[in-house]
Image (cartoon, coloured by chain):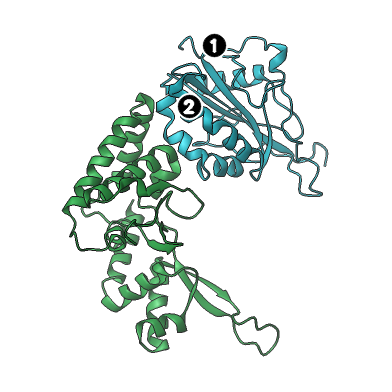
Chain colours: A cyan, B green
Amino acid sequence: MSASTPASASAPDPATAPSPAGSPDSGTAPGAAPAHHLAQINLGLLKAPLDDPSMKGFTDQLEPVNALADRSPGFVWRLIEQGGSDATGLRPFGPNTIINFSVWRDVETLWDFTYRTDHLDLLRRRRTWFERMDGVLVALWWIPAGTIPTVEEAGRKLDLVREIGPSPEAFTLRTPFPPPASHPQHA
Amino acid sequence: MDHASIDAAHAAHTLADPLRRRFYEYVAAADGDVSRGEAADALGVQRTLAAHHLDKLAEAGLLEVTRRKVNGREGPGSGRPAKLYRRADRELSLHLPPRDYELAARVLAEAVERHGAEEALHAAAREEGRRIGAAADPDAALPDLLRERGYEPEPAGGALRLRNCPFHSLARAFPPLACGLNLELLRGVLEGRGEDGARARMDPAEGRCCVTVSKNNED
């Protein structure tokens, strides 16, 4: 594994403690609230510091695309640095590795935002701003609705995809798994 | 594999009838569901003949059928729901002898992604597009050329929106790669025709190609 993708996340700085960017929508839709939400983390190894002129095409899009995420159907939460407007200043996986860490209602809404909005154009041009990274850069996993995942948990999920590939415990958008069955424990 | 080949062969056989093929093309190009009457009027044939061909196309899996009451009539006496037709989402490809280019495309896409070779992919797609554009009849209208290439162009506010993605399966599995390839290909086609490639731009939305071609400057 390259130095930029440490096998496990170090204990997060207090600044990395998740702070909700929007109110989780669990429990607000009577009778229709899902028991699970989908957490996702992805890593990007920067080719240059964010304030470098070569990164302008990316940094200019940060605010509008984050705003687009925030109002997209199924958006629940994303990691935001305290006092900031995004998570680009948080580097729990290495000094040049930025993270995108969010929670969505389900795989479909995350897929639609990722690939059916202006976000797709950022992905198309990612090689302009991000180094190719060996190994796993994305992990998705189901969490109990209404909870917020931690960076250590995200690190473990990335490790899991690296070690055994996509599984119900941690997977990718290309190989998704359904949420855990939520049948009652006692009939 | 065998089933898919038989299905595709059946579909190809079904489309061999020129009139039936025109029905298929009419429904595929329509924006929404088509009734028997609409199809009959559009092709200037009797309704019973239209019904026969539309049902053959549905049997072959080329069209999907829904039943809906039209004209907002409800309740007793409003008649049976009309049979409506639309192009099936299912993909059929026929290669004789059997070939599996889609599997090859997925493996190649995975390799491009692992290697971070997107820039090379974009450059190759742009060049291929230029060859296509340059080889095409210069007098042919752009929508006709796109149609020949498997897109389904439709005018949308002066722009051309593409209703079909010719790389649909690949685009579901590798969206940034396939859409990037597609955009560069279309920019190349425009440039090969001596037009401004920047007219093609990303405009992703559900149920259509990720690229829109904006208005021609001369229009």
Is A106 drawn above or below residue B215 in the view shown? above
Which residue is rendered at x = 19% and y = 59% of the image? B138
Distance from the alpha carbon under mark 1 to that under mark 2: 19 Å
The image shows residue B135 at horizontal and vertical percentages of: 16, 53
B187 or A134: nearer the eye?
B187
Which residue is rendered at x = 77% and y = 34% of the image? A146
Rendering quarter of residue A144 = top right
Mark 1 sits on what residue?
A: A95
Is B25 drawn above or below residue A41 in the view shown? below
Cβ–Cβ below 8 Å for labels 1 and 2?
Answer: no
Mark 2 sits on what residue?
A: A56
Badge 1: chain ID: A
Which residue is rendered at x = 56% and y = 31% of the image? A62
A130 or A148: nearer the eye?
A130
B217 or A80: nearer the eye?
B217
Identity of the amino acid at label 1? Pro
Badge 2: chain ID: A
Q: Secondary structure at mark 2?
A: helix
The image shows residue A66 at horizontal and vertical percentages of: 61, 34
Q: How many marks?
A: 2
